[in-house]
Image (spheres, rainbow, N blue to C red):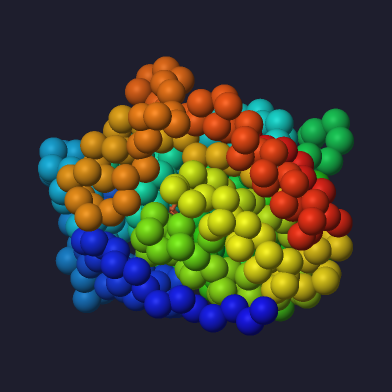
Amino acid sequence: MNIQPEQPLSLGSSPYPDQSIGKPTGFPDAVYYEPKALAFPLGKQLKRTYAELPWIEIENHNNIPEMRKSPNSAFPKLKRHLIIGVRKTHKYVPNHKVSDYLVPYTSSGCSAMCLYCYLVCHYNKCAYLRLFVNREDMLDRLIRHSDKADSPMTYEIGSNSDLVLENTVTGNLPWTIERFAQDGRGFITFPTKFSLVEPLLPLHHCGKTVFRMSLNPEEIIRKTEFGTAPLVSRIKALNEMCKSGYPVGIIIAPVILLPDWKNIYGRFLELLSDELSNDVKESSFIEIILMTYSYVQNAINTDAFPNAVTLYNREHMTGRGKGKYRYREPVRSEAEVFLRDKLSKTLGCMEILYVV
Ligand code: SF4
């Protein structure tokens, strides 16, 4: 089976109609900055790169009143802004999935607009891309932590943003990957929904960076992951990263149970079986995460994307505290059984790490 980019579906009011390159167009349109950020080399570099844009001084990247007070309908407009600051919190959170620790790193938020983005739960409509210019400080801490650990650890550095997208603005990833390869112990890892991996392919990574590609059926991407890369280019990027010697994994996430989900995900897994390289199939693992949703996301999506697909399903979902929803257990269980069965027939050689 050949994979061809599908025709774009109607995206309602998405401001990113061209998803073919996996990078939002027209971003950024303005830069909001903490003055102290300009004392750092990366701050100076960004000032030169975006010299022609409006630069607006802010006191604190965590609280920009004009954005906080904007209506939900302004969400797509806010996502076009770039925020630059200095990261002050460096708390490592123990994790027990693919990594041992979640590490705050060089960015939070993102310029894409996935309807289910968990960052909206944390930042509400202020889930725009914030860059932290004190990258030396953050990577030095990480390397020191890896040195002191009892055994080699895996550090998730991409849980707050999409580092491949961020890299198109900062160039931070090659610097991070090669410096960790040289001085760090254990592994770093990050997931992405973007395909712009060319700068990463020739790096000396020493196998210490685990690259994880987040995949979903093209129909789901078009309807819910505005501003991210199409499936066809994500698969290509994953194959290329594996060919370049990176340890790689696949995240099927979030699984969204739209009407006809069995056909949608069934066709998707057959397509992966056809298009993933043999190296990926033989060496990588699979994580599966079913969608959770929240009252906050629903409120923003309703105002910002009135024509978009509705993700909240009263019949299939139930509350799980703090305004969050998840699929009811019988529905979740049916999806897990279906996916495991289908995967055993299509990609049976790949290990499923977990289904949550
Ligand atoms: S790509 Fe990731 S971080 Fe960006 S909007 Fe989508 S889910 Fe959120």
Q: Is residue 156 above or below residue 33?
A: above
| Count of numbered marks | 0
Q: Is residue 22 visible?
A: yes
Using residue 309 as the reference point, say whether residue 329 is left or right of it: right
Using residue 200 as the reference point, say whether residue 284 is left or right of it: right
Residue 99 coordinates in the image, percent (x, y): 71, 40
Give the residue at x 86% y 63%. 282
Using residue 77 as the reference point, say whether residue 143 is left or right of it: right
Q: Is residue 93 above or below residue 136?
A: above
Viewer-nearest residue: 144 or 236? 236
Residue 324 coordinates in the image, percent (x, y): 40, 26
Determine which quarter of the picture holds residue 153: top right
Residue 277 coordinates in the image, percent (x, y): 77, 73
Q: Is residue 350 visible?
A: no
Give the residue at x 50% y 65%. 218
Q: Is residue 284 above or below residue 93?
A: below
Where, quadrant-wise, is the N terminus in this rendering? bottom right
Residue 337 coordinates in the image, percent (x, y): 69, 38
Where, quadrant-wise, is the C terminus in this rendering? top right
Determine which quarter of the picture holds residue 81: bottom left
Give the residue at x 54% y 68%. 231
Give the residue at x 67% y 44%. 338
Q: Is residue 274 above or below residue 301?
A: below
Using residue 262 as the reference point, say whether residue 278 is left or right of it: right
